[in-house]
Amino acid sequence: MRKLLLAAVLVGFAGAAFAQTSGSTTSTTTTTTTISPAWRGEIKEYVVKEKRAHIPPPAGFKAAVGAPLPPTVELYSFPPSAPYAKYRYSVIGDETVLVDPTDRKVVEVIR
């Protein structure tokens, strides 16, 4: 009887553990940002007009979509009326990087 009770308890624990692991799922959502060619031209003009200092690329940083921007890199705003105003930018080397300020990930590289 004791062995039967022990077996029932072990099966109960195993079932609970299985229910916890099999019931949880993880999903990832990837969003793609499209900067229109007209916006790219406007952005280039705006950045040139603002005369922001070009900074050298931080060690280990490669300007690519999805890359996290190091916290030491300063971000600048666009005018609130611009259709891309939700993004920020910085000039790294000869490239302007558009960044999502919520996670500091690069959404577009303008060369």
Image (spheres, helix red, strand yellow):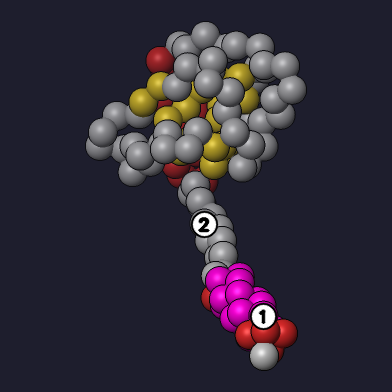
Q: Which residue is mark 1?
A: 6
Q: Which mark is residue 73?
A: none
Separation of marks 1 and 2 at Cα, in angstroms: 51 Å
Task: Report the span colored magenta.
Answer: 6-21
46 vs 33: above or below? above
Left or right: residue 108 versus residue 1 is left
Q: Is residue 29 rendered magenta in the image? A: no
Could you say which is closer to the camera, residue 7 or residue 44? 7
**Residue 107 rendering spot, x and y as whole percentages:** 54, 42
Q: Secondary structure at mark 2?
A: loop
Left or right: residue 3 versus residue 16 is right
Residue under the point 48% across and 37% down: 103
Extreme residue toward the front, this view: 1
Of marks 1 and 2, which one's residue comes earlier in the chain? 1
41 vs 93: above or below? below
71 vs 53: above or below? below
Q: Secondary structure at mark 1?
A: helix
Could you say which is closer to the camera, residue 95 or residue 27? 27
Q: Main secondary structure of the magenta part?
A: helix
Residue under the point 42% across and 38% down: 102
**Residue 32 rendering spot, x and y as whole percentages:** 54, 55
Q: Which residue is mark 2?
A: 31
Left or right: residue 60 versus residue 75 is right
**Residue 36 rendering spot, x and y as whole percentages:** 48, 49
The amino acid sitting under disc 2 is Thr
The amino acid sitting under disc 1 is Leu
